[in-house]
Amino acid sequence: MNAAPTLRIVADAGTLAAEAAALVIERARAAVAERGRFMWALSGGATPRATYARLAESPERARMPWEQTWVFFGDERCVPPDHPESNYRMASETLLAKVPVPAGQVFRMRGEAVDAEAAAAEYTRTLAEAFGTRRGELPRFDVILLGFGVDGHTASLFPGSPALKEIFRPVAAVHAAAAALPQRLTLTYPVLNAAACVVFLGSGAEKAKVVKTMLGEHARLPAAMVQPTDGTLLWILDRDAAVLLSPGSAR
Ligand code: 6PG
């Protein structure tokens, strides 16, 4: 049974960052209490920057169990880790370089790899080793943070992409529409939908139209197809991104 999404609408981008940070801390502390560690996949893009910055500052920084936190990525661009477009670089600059998460517990996707398919297979092995899963088993993240584009993509699952049809491989190399070479690496729906908690973050008026579409009843855009089979689905939106939703939509 797919969980109906929980929708939290907050005043602005700053409040969204505070709300998202508080949720990550709550889930992290619960995961460590239950299983001794917190398995967390980060989103790329601009929206989560403020949440990461918030977690790197007091008082949130001290409330996170960094020593027991294991950090992964929902997707990565096919660029080196020091490239301005690298999600790993963004997360390092805003968060990872500022908190005491053990370096051996941060697992980036190798966007710099010449063979993106091999890098996807390598990350699949990385996940299996970190989660201790056997062949055919899926890693179950405690929290996966996701954003979404105005076209309804999430992670690097874009409308029309063959990766949307991937039902076995946890990680795929993605060719942007016209590009000859893979442009991205991404977790696929099987892993996203195996998570204990998926959190979408959305901010800004430019997202309002796609938010209305994606939270509609018959939404088929990639981000709308993320529906944890045995987990929580939460959308945290600021008022501008939620402006086209009917009053009382928050639930
Ligand atoms: C990425 C993300 C991508 C992002 C959306 C929204 O690598 O960029 O995985 O899915 O979340 O494109 O990006 P913004 O937060 O910048 O609007």
Image (cartoon, grey):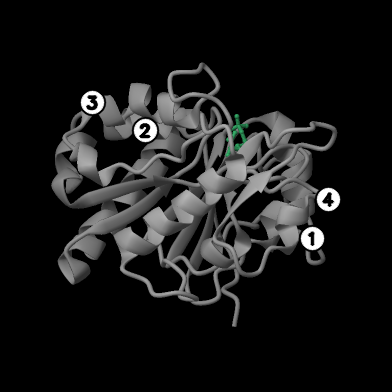
Q: Residues within 10 Å of mark 3 (few under 14, many from 20)?
A: some
Q: What kind of element bears circle 4?
A: loop
Of labels 3 and 4, earlier in sequence is 3
Residue 98 numbered tag: 3
Measure the alpha-carbon separation of dots 2 and 1. 29 Å
Of labels 2 and 1, earlier in sequence is 2
Mark 1, residue position = 219
Measure the alpha-carbon separation of dots 2 and 4. 30 Å
In the rendered image, residue 12, in percent from the top left (x then y), is placed at 52, 32
Q: What residue type is labelled 3?
A: Lys
In the rendered image, residue 202, in percent from the top left (x then y), is placed at 59, 40
Measure the alpha-carbon separation of dots 3 and 4. 38 Å
Q: What residue type is labelled 1?
A: Ala
Asked whether the residues under the numbered discs 2 and 1 touch, taking CB atoms below 8 Å apart as contact, a structural biologist would say: no
Asked whether the residues under the numbered discs 3 and 4 touch, taking CB atoms below 8 Å apart as contact, a structural biologist would say: no
Q: Which amino acid does label 2 sit on?
A: Tyr
Mark 4, residue position = 160
Tell me which image quadrant ligand 1 sits in: top right
Against 104, residue 4 (above or below) is: below
Q: Does the residue labelled 2 lie within 8 Å of ligand 1?
A: no
Foreground residue among 66 and 119 = 119
Image quadrant containing the C terminus: bottom right
Q: Is mark 4 within 8 Å of ligand 1?
A: no
